[in-house]
């Protein structure tokens, strides 16, 4: 009887809602609700307790009732949010900080006395503690890079170095006895003492080895001449009286090299030229590695071919140690691409020349000229040695 009354009440309520709204979707919702109630009656799972009409809208009422009747296992949960919870006391904060410091100390590196430090000085090849190579990040002279591979360096590794090794190869049949050491050549140790092992060769006979210069070593697979550094020096003698000459010289050197130059000073008095010791004389910069190869490539490819009637480099240049030098006139500086596209920025009357020193690993001027000719530099004249 109660079930029929309940169905009658719900049907009357749905009909009232439908008549008030008059929407087709409301009619469909009422039909679905009646179908659901009939299915529940057939399965005898109908909840006989009447649900308040505003149960879905005011759900917080049921939550509060459930919270008052929750079991003892959930009694430790906070009844308030984190925004209204009180701040921890100072003792708790200090204890948490101590735990964090201890865990960070356990994860960190050991003290400095247990870490590896490379030796500060090189004590020879036989010392038990050797310095790491410069490519090792722990080395004191570590320089990161290279970050690019110059085109000229690639040509040197693939073509020039093998050609130099093949051109300077001297075949010696097995069993050939080396000639006796002559004056001015290094001598081998006789091996009469255990200290002779792994020692470098003895000096030349007759003494005065410092006046002989660096002795030329043969080109072998581990001794092929290559470019070690390039120094660009711009001398502006009038910079002591007019600072504009120094500014232009520094700007020119920085533009063609890509590095910030250092200011050079006069080392000795020259009364005839009006030069005093300590005066600013110009700017210079030294390029190494890939920057040196890029500058040499720029010289050979872009700058030197534009100079009209340029004979080349004098074959008599050199310092007997494989290092060569040549000069650039002020009028030739405009052929550098960094200056050519913005030539108006440099005053023509203040434009300085420069001297270019190419340092090689060769042990004689002959080896230096051989390397420079392979790189594309022309030479003229007769070499002195």
Image: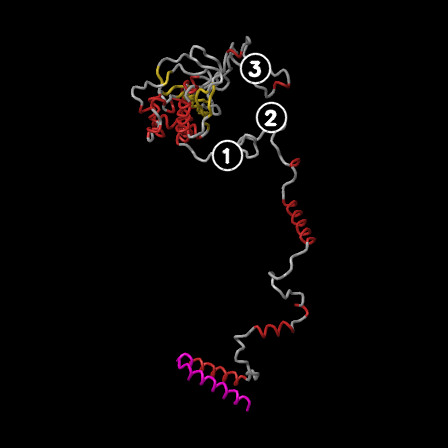
Between label 3 and label 1, give the one nearer the viewer: 1
Name the residue rendered at 46%, 20% in the picture.
280
Q: Give the CA separation, mark 3 to mark 1.
A: 37 Å
From this view, report whether residue 133 is shown above or below residue 191: below
From this view, report whether residue 117 is shown above or below residue 39: above
Name the residue rendered at 31%, 24% in the picture.
306
- How many numbered callouts? 3
Looking at the image, is mark 3 or mark 2 earlier in the sequence? Answer: 2
Residue 195 picture quarter: top right
For the C terminus, give its image quadrant: top left
Looking at the image, is mark 1 or mark 2 earlier in the sequence? Answer: 2
Q: Report the side of 120 relative to 21 (left or right).
A: right
The colour scheme applied to this rendered structure is secondary structure
Q: What element carries label 1?
A: loop
Residue lying farthest to the left in this orientation: 308
199 and 268: which is toward the camera = 268
Segment tinted magenta in the rendering = 1-26
Residue 202: numbered disc: 3
255 and 37: which is toward the camera = 255
Residue 144: numbered disc: 1
> Dot 2 corresponds to which residue?
121
Q: Give the CA separation, mark 1 to mark 2.
A: 21 Å
- Across and down, in percent, residue 236 comes to 41, 20
293 and 248: which is toward the camera = 248
What is the chief secondary structure element of the magenta stretch?
helix
């Amino acid at each position: 009887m109660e079930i029929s009354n309940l169905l009658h009440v719900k049907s009357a309520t749905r009909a009232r809602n439908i008549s008030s709204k008059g929407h087709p979707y409301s009619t469909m919702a009422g039909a679905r609700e009646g179908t659901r109630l009939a299915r529940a009656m057939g399965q005898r799972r109908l909840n006989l307790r009447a649900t308040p009409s505003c149960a879905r809208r005011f759900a917080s009422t049921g939550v509060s009732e459930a919270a008052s009747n929750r079991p003892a296992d959930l009694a430790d949960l906070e009844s308030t949010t984190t925004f209204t919870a009180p701040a921890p006391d100072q003792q708790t904060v200090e204890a948490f900080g101590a735990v964090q410091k201890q865990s960070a100390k356990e994860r960190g590196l050991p003290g400095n006395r247990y870490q590896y430090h490379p030796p500060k000085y090189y004590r020879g090849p036989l010392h038990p503690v050797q310095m790491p190579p410069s490519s090792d990040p722990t080395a004191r002279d570590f320089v990161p890079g290279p970050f690019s591979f110059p085109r000229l360096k690639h040509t040197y590794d693939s073509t020039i170095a093998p050609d130099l090794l093949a051109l300077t190869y001297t075949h010696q049949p097995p069993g050939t006895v080396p000639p006796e050491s002559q004056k001015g050549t290094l001598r081998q140790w006789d091996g009469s003492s255990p200290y002779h092992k792994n020692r470098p060769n003895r000096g030349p006979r007759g003494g005065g080895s410092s006046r002989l210069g660096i002795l030329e070593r043969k080109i072998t697979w581990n001794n092929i001449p290559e470019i070690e550094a390039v120094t660009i020096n711009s001398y502006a003698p009038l910079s002591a009286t007019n600072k504009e000459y120094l500014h232009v010289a520094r700007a020119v050197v920085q533009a063609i090299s890509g590095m910030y130059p250092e200011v050079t000073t006069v080392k000795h008095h020259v009364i005839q030229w009006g030069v005093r010791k300590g005066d600013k004389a110009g700017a210079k910069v030294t390029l190494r590695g890939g920057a040196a190869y890029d500058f040499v490539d720029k010289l050979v490819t872009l700058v030197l071919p534009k100079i009209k009637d340029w004979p080349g480099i004098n074959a008599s240049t050199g310092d007997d140690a494989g290092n060569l030098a040549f000069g650039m006139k002020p009028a030739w500086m405009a052929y550098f691409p960094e200056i050519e596209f913005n030539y108006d920025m440099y005053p023509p009357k203040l434009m300085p020349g420069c001297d270019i020193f190419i340092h090689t690993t060769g042990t004689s001027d002959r080896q230096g000229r051989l390397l420079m000719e392979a790189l594309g530099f022309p030479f003229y004249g007769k070499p002195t040695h």
